[in-house]
Image (tube, rainbow, N blue to C red):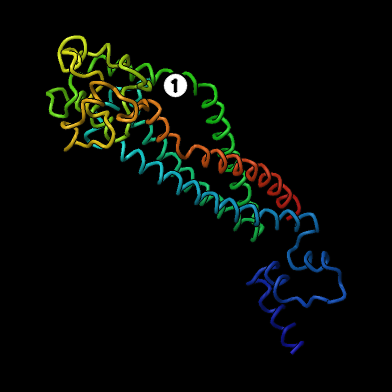
Amino acid sequence: MAAFKQYFIVSFRPLLGRRIVHRFLLPISLTENTCSTLSLIMGLDCVGIFGMILLVVINIILLIFGIGFLIVGVLALQDVADLNEDHIKPVLNTIEVNSFQVGELAKNLSILLIVIGVFIFFVSILGFLGACSQNICMLVTYDILVLILLVMKIAIIALWFTMQNKVEEEVKSKMLTRLKDNFKSDTITDNNEISNAWNYLFMSLDCCAVDPVTSTTNDFDQTTWCTTSGSCQATNSDIPRTCCNGVDENTYSTAPTSCHSSVTPGTYNTKGCYDALKDILTSHLSSIIGVGVSIMVLEILSVVFTVIVCKFA
């Protein structure tokens, strides 16, 4: 048996390659210490073996996090799709941030999350295979892609924290302006599409106006509905009937006067639509930050251990 094994090794070494022969065919003495044994099997010294094992583990975790990013992106895209319904979309299209419509911007950011998740998934597979095979070309390519990912995420985080307050203020200001300019009636049958969309927004998000409504003095005071024509201007209403609790497109017309006329606490949605919109768009933010920071830490470690494996391979 021993003679046959030796003949097999000698005959097939050129075909199988040195590493495969060393890993699977050479006899390993049980009296050798663990590190020496692994060095013989893998063709690495102890430091290289340590780096390779950790690199494999890190990439398995990165693969899982990549799937997590993908799932969060899909969930966020679904939330945005609910916002971008035909009835509500005209309102979102009037709110722009640096020439980007809010609805489309949120959709594109969700798609970006999905793309990043897919990219991390495939890069982690590349790193895993490169570490297992000790393929220098694969590991160098992996290192470059990880560094690109890392720099991109750092840039995105820096940009977000730099512009967050400015973007939020601009969105809120644009919403107030669009409400003032376009809200004509508290119905969904007006000839103004944007006015109808505001009413659909109130009923869909259970919100009212832009800022929270706490009294008869509110954001609607400066709208055409209150200053020119409409039930507010006629002093019949102080908030739209579509702001009342529990109403929908079929029941809003019979909303109680205690809600839209008297603005009695508990009968209407007090939450402003800016806050309601913000809650939906940032509902997955904590998950994104948690996964993103974890991925960045793992990416830094993966770069270090890739260098170690390349050096000792």
Residue drawn at point x = 75 percent, y = 68 percent: 41
Vertical placement of residue 231 versus 255, above or below: above
Residue drawn at point x = 59 percent, y = 44 percent: 295
Residue drawn at point x = 55 percent, y = 53 percent: 63
Reading the image, the residue beneath label 1 is: 167
In which quarter of the view is residue 263 placed?
top left
Residue 254 horizontal/vertical position (percent): 16, 32
> In the figure, is residue 278 to the left or right of 128?
left
Could you say which is closer to the camera, residue 127 or residue 291?
A: 291
Give, as a three-letter code, the residue at label 1.
Val
The tally of labels here is 1
Label 1: which secondary element: helix
Residue drawn at point x = 70 percent, y = 68 percent: 18
In which quarter of the view is residue 146 placed?
top right
Residue 266 horizontal/vertical position (percent): 34, 30
Q: Residue at the bottom extreme?
A: 1
> In the figure, is residue 110 to the left or right of 289?
left
